[in-house]
Amino acid sequence: MPSATQDNASANGNIIGGNELAKPRLTAPLTYSGSLDGFASNDLTPVIGREFEGLQVAELLKGDDQLIRDLAVTISQRGVVFLRNQDVTPTQMKDFMLRLTELSGCPSSSSLHVHPLTEEGSELGDQISVISSEKQKKGGGLTHQLSDVSRFASNGWHSDITFEPVPSDYVGT
């Protein structure tokens, strides 16, 4: 579950021995309300992954916040959720990810992450990393930056943004 407990806080709400910036908005864990039970879903393995059929991000943005909270709980419990065949704009996706993190209790100091490899001044904004096959063909992008695997094959291994003072709870692709 994302940082949604009060275990790291004293009785008066102050952080004890922790990062004040990482103080969650919630004082108790989120619980699943059942608001997504009406949507067809399939657990991809017994322990990880759930796919929702027909659940559109654009519709979630128009709906009740409880749907997004329940999606956050499901992601935290199942590790990953798949919402395939989306008809969503980059702006809607940014709005959805921001609401998902805020409604699940991210610290008020937290916002959408800007990845260190994102080009500054991207036409879609700094919070969206564009992965383009056309850019790869021209010798740019992530493939170019990680292309020398002959000597250091482990260079491609990573753990997303764990060095940040408040690491991301969720990633949208």
Image (spheres, helix red, strand yellow):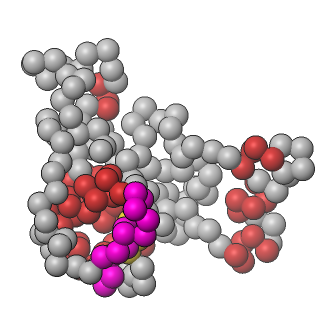
Residue 91 in picture, x, y percent from top left: 37, 71
Residue 31 in picture, x, y percent from top left: 15, 51
* Front residue of 51 and 170: 51
Q: Looking at the picture, does residue 20 appear above or below residue 48?
A: above
Q: Which residues are magenta?
A: 41-54
Residue 115 in picture, x, y percent from top left: 54, 50
Residue drawn 82% across the image and 56% down it:
147
Q: Is residue 56 in view?
A: no
Q: Is residue 48 magenta?
A: yes
Residue drawn 65% across the image and 73% down it:
132
Q: Is residue 127 in view?
A: yes
* Front residue of 31 and 23: 31
Q: Looking at the picture, does residue 60 appear above or below residue 70?
A: below
Please identify the quarter of the rendering in which residue 58 is found. Answer: bottom left
Residue drawn 23% across the image and 72% down it:
61
Q: Looking at the picture, does residue 134 appear above or below residue 108?
A: below
Farthest residue toward the front? 46
Q: Looking at the picture, does residue 130 appear above or below residue 32?
A: below
Residue 147 in the figure: left or right of residue 58? right
Q: How many marks?
A: 0
Residue 75 in the figure: left or right of residue 113? left
Residue 5 in picture, x, y percent from top left: 21, 34
The N terminus: image quadrant? top left
Farthest residue toward the right? 150
Q: Is residue 77 magenta?
A: no
